[in-house]
Amino acid sequence: MQKKVVILGGGVAGLSAAHELIERGFAVDVYEAKKIPGGKARSIPVPNTGGMGPNGPRKPLPGEHGFRFFPRFYKHIVDTMARIPYGKNKTVADNLVDTTRVEMARYGQRPIVFPSRSPRTFADVQEILNEFPTIFGPDFGVSPEEIAFFGTKVWQIVTSCEERRLAEYEKEDWWEFVGADQRSPAYQKIFGHGITRSLVAAKAHLASTKTIGDIFVQLLFDLVEPGPSSDRVLNAPTNDAWINPWLAYLIRQGVQYHLEAKVLAIDCVNGLIQGATIEQDGQTFQAQGDYYIAAVPIERMAELVTDSLKTADPELGKLHQLSEGGVSWMNGIQLYLTQDVPLSHGHAIYVDSPWALTSISQRQFWPGVDFNQYADGRIKGIISVDISEWDEKGLNGKTAKECTREEVKNEVWAQLKKSINIHGQEILKDEYLDHWFLDPAIYLVEGEGDTNEEPLLVNLINTWVKRPDAVTDIPNLFLASDYVRTYTDLATMEGANEAARRAVNGIIESANMDAPPCKIWKLHEQEIFEPWRVIDRIRFHQGLPWDDSLVRWGLSALKLAHQGGRILEQLLGVTIDQPLEKLGNPLYAVGTQGFDNVELRQELMEVVQKSVLDIVVRMAESQTMPETIPSLATLQTLSEQHHPSFVQSSKQPPQRSGKVRIIPE
C-alpha cells in the first residue's frame, strides 16, 4: 500500500523533499502558507506594475526576497535542478549561467575586480596581475604582513581535522580567530566584518569560525580550481527559470500542492503525530498521512513546538532558543532603471557600505527576457541589492530599521552611488531610477516594533548543539529546513535541499522501503591537504592544539616529490612533462583537474600523499621535532623505515608506460 507523506512548507526544502519522495513512489501532499510557491527563493510580482497595456497584458516587474546565488560547491540543489525538465531536451540546471567577475567596490576609490573562476584566458590572468599593486599598495589599507597573517589562518582551517573544527572552532568567533582586534581598521573591515556580514549577515564577534571558515574555504577553492565559475546565477527571474517548471513537474508526477494553506498546529499524541491542523480559505482541517515533514523556517517551527512535541523529543525544545537568538536580517531591494547599467559581470561587495550591501545587475544575465513586456516597457535594467546590516547607521545617520521604506531606498541608492560614481564618473544617475521594491517581509514602524517575517538563520558560536537532526525521536516526524544539521552548515538553498534529502532517507528507512537513498555530499576537502588533516586528527585526540610546525614538516616532506621526480617516474613507469614544483602550490588542484589520465592522476596523488603522510605521522606520534629541515636523503630514509611497501613498490614499478602532463599554473 502506498505510503503518504504530508509536507508542511512549500519552499525549497519542501519542494526538494516532495521531489525525492514522489520519485520513490510515495504519495505527497504539500501545504504552503503563501500565495506563491518557492519560499524565500520565490519571485514576487511588484504590485501595480502589471495590468493591461495598449497591446495586451503587461507583466508585473519581478521582485524578490533577495538575489539567487549558486556557488560551485552547491551539489545537492544543482543535482535536483538537473532532474527538472525544462523545454525540449533541457533541464532547469541548464538555466544556470556563469558570472566571470566579482567586484569589491569602495568609497571614492577604484574597485578591485577579480575573476570569479580559475583563470581561463590571458585577460583573466592580466586582471589578477593588475590588481596586485592595489592589494599590496597603501590605498588598500591592509599591509602585506596582515594579508600573509590572514593566509595563515586560512591555512589553519584547511589543515584542521573535522573534529577540531566542531569541538573548537564552533565555539570560537571569527573576529577572535582572525586576530582582528590586533590589526588595522582596514583588515577588520575586509577580513573581519566584511566576510561575515556579506556571507551570512552575522557579526564577526558572534559568528562561528567553523561555519565561516568552512564556507570561505569552499568559495576560495571554487575560485582557484579549474572548472565552472564559482558564482552562477539564473538566466531569468527565479520562478520563470526554476520554481514554476519545478512545481509543474511535481504536479505531473502526482504531488498535491496547496497554496495559502497555513499550518496552525502539529498534533502529537502518545509520541506520534496524528495530523497537522491547516487553515485555508477561512476553514480549518486536519491533514493526515503516514509520515510528516516539517519544512517551515526556524522562527515558524519554534512556534509550532508544543509541550507534547517536547516530551516526545526534548531536542525540539531547543528550537525556541535557537530562533530567539539565532536569526538576523538579510533582505533585498530591487532598483528598476530606465537605462541598463551592467556594472560588474557578477556580484559586487560594497566593502565601505555601513549597511553591508551586495548587488548584482541582472539584465546582462537574462538574454532571453524581453523587458518590453514588463510594466510600461520603460524599464531596461534591474540592480538587485541585499542589505545584510540593519543596525548600523548609514550616511543619513539612521540605521535601516530606523528608516521608512522610502528612506531605505534613498540610503541604499546613496551608498551605491558613493561606491560606484568615483573619479568624476556618474555611472548611476538619479534620473535612471524609475521604480523600486523592498522585500514585503520587512515591516518598518516608528519606534520599537520593526519586524521581519522572513529572517535568516545565522550560525552563531556554539549553536550546533541546539540544532536538531532531520530524523527526530518521534517515529513519523522529520525535519527539512536550513536550521537542520547538515554538511552544508549554512542557511542556504543548498542546506535546505540537503536537509530534505536527510529527512527523506529517514522516511525510507522507517518505512523499510526498497528504494535508493538520496545522495548526500560532504563539503569538498582538497585531497592534497588530507595528510595534514590526518596529522591534526592525531594531535586532536592526543589533546594537543593545531601546530604550525607540523605544516612546515609536511611541506619539507613534500620536497620528496619535488626533488624526487625520477623516483616517481620509476614508481609510475611514466615520463613527467613539467617540473613537480607545480605540486608545491597548495591551491593547485592536484588530483582534480591536472592530468588527462584519471588513473595515473590518482596514482600520483596517492604516492605524494603517502610520502608526506608517513613521515609526518611518525613525527606526530612520537612528538619528536628536529630543529632543522631534513635533507631529501633523510626524508627518503625515514619513509623507507616507516613504510616498507613504499620501498618495495619503488623497486618494482608497475608494468605500464605513458606520459603524465602537468598543466602549468
Image (spheres, rainbow, N blue to C red):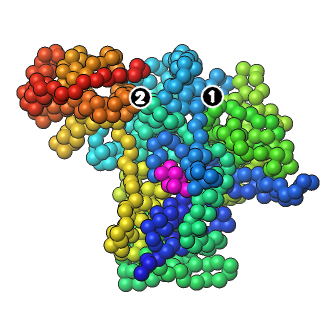
Outermost residue toward the right? Answer: 54
In front: 568, or 238? Answer: 568
**Residue, x 22% and y 27% (percent of image)?**
656
> Can the viewer see residue 648?
yes
- Return the residue at label 2: 150
What label sits on residue 106 in the rendered view? 1
Q: Which residues are magenta?
A: 78-84
**Residue, x 86% and y 49% (percent of image)?**
376
Q: Position of residue 373 (x, y in %)?
A: 81, 49
Cα–Cα span, label 2 and label 1 = 21 Å
Q: Position of residue 496 (x, y in %)?
A: 48, 57
In front: 259, or 282? Answer: 259
**Residue, x 58% and y 84% (percent of image)?**
285
Q: Position of residue 341 (x, y in %)?
A: 74, 34
Residue 243 located within the stretch drawn in magenta: no
Q: Position of residue 484 (x, y in %)?
A: 42, 59
How packed mark 1 is, by other alpha carbons closer than 10 Å (few <14, some 14-19, many 20 or more), is many
Amino acid type, label 2: Phe
Quadrant containing the C terminus is top left
Looking at the rendered structure, the secondary structure element under dot 2 is helix
Amino acid type, label 1: Arg
In front: 368, or 309? Answer: 368
User: In the image, 538: left or right of 439?
Assistant: left
In front: 140, or 156? Answer: 156
